[in-house]
Amino acid sequence: MNSKPATNEPADNVPYHTLDHDEVLRRLESANNGLTSAEAAQRLERYGKNMLQETKTKSLLAKFIEQFKNVMIFILLAAAILSGILGEWTDTVIILLVVILNAVLGVIQENKAEQALEALKSMSSPMARIRRDGQVMEIKSEELVPGDIVLLEAGNVVPADLRVLESASLQTEEAALTGESLPSDKHAGVLEGTDLALGDRINMAYMSSSVTYGRGVGVVTATGMSTEVGRIAGFIAQAEQDVTPLQKKLDELGKYFTYIILGVCVVIFAVGILEGRDMLDMLLTSISLAVAAIPEGLPAIVTIILALGVQRMAKRKAIIRKLPAVETLGSTEIICSDKTGTLTLNQMTVEKLYINGQSMEATDAVKGESGGELLLQAMTLCNDSSIDESKESGTGGTDGKKEAKTAKTKSGKAIIGDPTETALVDYALSIGVDKRELEKQYPRKRELPFDSDRKLMTTVHEQGQGGEFRAYTKGAPDVLLSKCSHIYEAGHVVPLTEEHSRQITARNKQLADEALRVLAFAYRDYGELPGEMTPESAETELVFIGLCGMIDPPRDEVRDAVAVCRKAGIRPVMITGDHRDTAAAIAKRLGIIDDDRSVLTGRELDKISEADFAEKVTDYSVYARVSPEHKVRIVKAWRQKGKIVAMTGDGVNDAPALKSADIGVGMGITGTDVAKGVSDMVLADDNFTTIVVAVEEGRKVYSNIRKAIQFLLSANLGEVLTLFIATMIGWRILEPIHILWINLVTDTLPALALGLEKAGEDVMKRKPRKSSSSIFADGVGAGIVYQGIIEAGLTLLVYYWAHTHYDEGVAVTMAFATLGLLQITHAFNVRSNTKSLFQIGWFTNRFMLGASLISGLLLVLVIIIPSLNEWFGVKHLSGLQWGIVCGAAVAIVVIVEIVKLFLRVSGKGKTWD
């Protein structure tokens, strides 16, 4: 890439859509014949190549080093170093293994390369046809400069931002940029208003959009990072990477533990020195306390629980690209959703018809109606789309390339052409009328192509062997109606009266008010093939047939998904580049809004200050005709309210907002690579309902993470209290290696099993938790404290009894075994803070049973295997001694069950679970 960035100043300062042809060329210092090679070379040096800048990515080593920037990890490393200095190499090795394992898991989690800008670059047209030195030539699109004259035709990708100078039925597909599902008609005229949304700037063509119809000539107004796509790339690169609510809580947890650990260690060390104990001995004791206090397995366990959630969600069509997104979904309060392709099918569909003076649903028996066959023939024959038998129906997805011309259809056929025309052919196919058969029966002989100024299209077809011909015309209802003199009614052609015209006009308005795109159809018979076709001769004295209303319909399942969202306390918000009426109509169908007062357009939003909008953002649930900047502004306004925001989308225009949201949700099928590249989650089936499934899974994952945290911290608190009290009264109860083994073996597997608990039945009937809510709320903190005290008390009691009956080695071994088994049995308690194990079922989580057996076996093995017990400094235990240890382990279940019973009876259980 050219080292000099593209800084196309004219594009930033000049509203080219408001200037006429001559003024545009004057401002850009260009001409109809284009630039000279010398001028182009100078501008290329000034503006840089027509390419998007790349962002630097972190190296694998940098990602690995970042994993160690954690307070708890620093303390563990310090403990490892001290252990090595004091000759406790076993402790050092084990601690370092734990730290390195956590770092490796963190790198795996984050090693998802950012592909957004690469995807944007791939959308650029590799070559462009231009006028330069007065001649038409083809050059690499990266060499385009402001002022170049570009020639466009159907199938081209627009290589830069252009001001259209000439157009002949020119249409461009801009759905990925503006959010509009229909191609945009392009004209060369002058527009008024500097604040027009991109979709309304019909004399501009934008980089990465594709030409679907006609041809045109445009002058380059912006290249590279100064194009609209380039600006989006800039938003993507500048968007801040915020940490998730869970990450914030874990960071806070680390800070609290740092203060506690350092305080306790200082107190223990000071007390020991004052009592005259050996300094090295007290250092080892302090290290033991530090190791006991730090839940060193917590980062790895949280990561693994998230990863397990990712696997479950993948089976349900939600692909997670970034692990923390799983937890963030669980706290989502706002879902800002793009309309086209997300809430709707991104597929124009015939919905209503008007023939014989009456409206009817498209699902009704049209073929049986008088005039029905005639209307179907007009729909399919006066139509330039075609059925491609070489491939199956496309997905409708596009990255701005010409493959987008193949439409997604209900009939399952691949239909190539304009979305409006493909909808007509697809509808006819769905009720048994095949365009291919009709064309064989009524071959096309003449045509007047659609013209956006004329708003009509006419084709002439042979009507069999009798030398008769019929012309079909379709177009804008008001225009076509003015060309009609008769109407086909009840099987007869009768003069078109004023009453007919009023009825047709009223019906057209009614359909338009329902946000339907309305086309009118007419015909005219000829005794012989017309000669030269002109609009004046062919599009007059027509016989009106009927109207057809189309829309990009909402997905069938989305309304139910919206209802579930509302029940779960989640507010859906629609953000679209489409027109206000269309957006409002779709939103009402889906149950997002009840009236138009909740709709705001991009132009209206521009008139509201940041401060006022931050206050009023709750008043609106639908945003129409918006730009990428508006989407980011909406997302940020909700986040300023303290809400956790998810943003769904499939187009390039959605990418900045996807990255700005707490969680970006891209569409896997219709989504552009850009949108998927910046998303935290991708829906493999493009189904809005999958978001609800993902939210449910996210809530379940967060609940299970809290259970794992409660289990680990209560266990660590038990260890700290055990060591602290023992040290204060002069007992040498446990060594650092004992604590590390318990934390690695008897903590880790049960904690992971807690991550596989099933979701509660009411998980989607609760309000989302607030991002500010403590991780210790709802009984978690209280559970950690009292359960930790029970663990310490039982362990000290067993040690005291053993110390009075046996030697020091047996007492230490019994304390070690008791603390380890206590934590294994305690894992069953944490499955619920209020429900009894007998309510939940001992065997409903088979992973917990397996984890308990494995952890218990690993604990027992280091005691009974001679070489291991010498390494760990423990002794063999007799049957009585094992009986006492197991009795203490079971006792914690009995005690916690009594506490749960009290909570249920007192009515406090509702706030504890």
Image: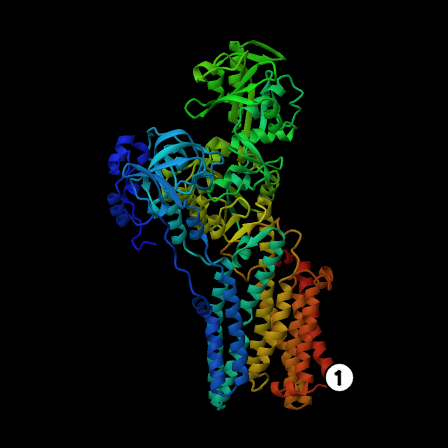
Residue 468 sits above or below residue 109 on the image:
above
Q: Residue, x 48% and y 72% (percent of image)?
A: 73
Residue with the most extreme right position? 879
> What residue is drawn where x is 52% and y is 15%?
529
| Vertical position of residue 874 compared to residue 712: above or below | below
- Given residues 639 and 752, the one toward you in this image is 752
Circle 1 sits in a helix, a strand or a loop, which is it? Answer: helix
In the displayed structure, 513 sits above or below 465; it is below
| Observer able to see residue 518 | yes
Q: Position of residue 237 (x, y in %)?
A: 39, 53
| Residue 763 percent across, percent down from the top left | 62, 52
> What is the quadrant of residue 559 in the picture?
top right
Task: Residue 79: give x, y in percent of width and height.
Answer: 48, 79
Q: Residue at x 64, y 73 (%)?
A: 823
Q: Is residue 254 left or right of residue 11?
A: right
Q: Quadrant of residue 898?
A: bottom right
Which amino acid is tagged 1?
A: Gly
Above or below — where is 107 with respect to 528? below
Relative side of 367 to 507, left or right: right
Q: Which residue is mark 1?
A: 879
Q: How is the image coloured?
A: rainbow
Q: Quarter holding the C terminus?
A: bottom right
Where on the picture, by quarter, is residue 876?
bottom right
